[in-house]
């Protein structure tokens, strides 16, 4: 799903700047090749990715005001329980004020808990800049893409 969104955005928005972040307990910015070919394992600390994303946004020339910023997160829904509060704070205080939209995509997995989507929904019920969806299997990809792009942001 991420690949198809990536292809569509690059085709329709020439000059698009994309940053890829991967993480387990620590986040790192990587190139596209690494992003699509890395499997992370172990503990998951989503706030490390949110913090890195915020630092990258703060480095933009002119600040976030001069840019259209759309954030996409793909996850199996796992996160360290004691990290959820920090994630909510980073989204609320750092990322959402700077972006046009935050899209959370939870991919169903035998290994993932699926709990983080509930954290997002509880903290940001009906927030204008947040859209979320679940992909249960390959057949759900098209509907999930529609869910993300029909909100109108």
Image (tube, helix red, strand yellow):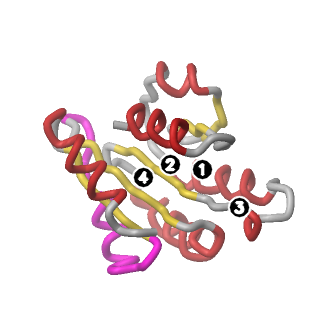
- To which residue does mark 1 refer? 48
Mark pair 2, 1: CA separation: 6 Å
Residue 107: % across, % down: 27, 43
Q: Secondary structure at mark 3?
A: loop
Q: Secondary structure at mark 1?
A: helix
Q: Quadrant of residue 137?
A: top left
**Residues at discs 3 and 1 in contact (Cβ within 8 Å):** no
Mark 4 vs mark 2: which is more N-terminal? 2
Residue 109: % across, % down: 22, 37
In the image, what residue occupies the spot 48% across and 37% down?
6
**Residues at discs 3 and 4 in contact (Cβ within 8 Å):** no
Residue range (magenta): 110-129
Q: Secondary structure at mark 2?
A: loop
Which circle marks residue 67 in the picture?
Answer: 3
Mark pair 4, 2: CA separation: 6 Å
Depth order, front residue of 83/2 = 2
Q: Mark 3, mark 4: which one is toward the viewer?
A: 3
- To which residue does mark 4 refer? 80
**Residues at discs 1 and 4 in contact (Cβ within 8 Å):** no
Q: Main secondary structure of the magenta part?
A: loop
**Residues at discs 2 and 1 in contact (Cβ within 8 Å):** yes
Q: Quadrant of residue 149?
A: bottom left
Mark pair 1, 4: CA separation: 11 Å
Mark pair 2, 3: CA separation: 27 Å
Mark 3 vs mark 1: which is more N-terminal? 1
Which circle marks residue 45 in the picture?
Answer: 2
Residue 69: % across, % down: 61, 59
């Amino acid at each position: 799903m991420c690949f198809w969104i990536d292809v569509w955005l690059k085709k329709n928005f020439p000059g698009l700047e994309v940053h890829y972040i991967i993480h387990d307990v620590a986040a790192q910015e990587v190139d596209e090749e690494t992003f699509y070919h890395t499997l992370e394992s172990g503990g998951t600390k989503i706030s490390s990715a949110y913090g890195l994303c915020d630092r990258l946004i703060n480095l933009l020339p002119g600040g976030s005001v001069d840019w259209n910023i759309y954030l996409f997160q793909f996850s199996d829904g796992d996160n360290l329980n004691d990290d959820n509060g920090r994630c909510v704070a980073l989204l609320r205080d750092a990322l959402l004020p700077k972006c046009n939209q935050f899209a959370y995509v939870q991919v169903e997995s035998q290994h993932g808990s699926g709990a983080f989507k509930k954290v997002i929904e509880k903290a940001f019920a009906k927030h204008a800049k947040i859209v979320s969806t679940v992909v249960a299997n390959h057949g759900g990809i098209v509907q999930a893409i529609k869910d993300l792009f029909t909100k109108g942001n």
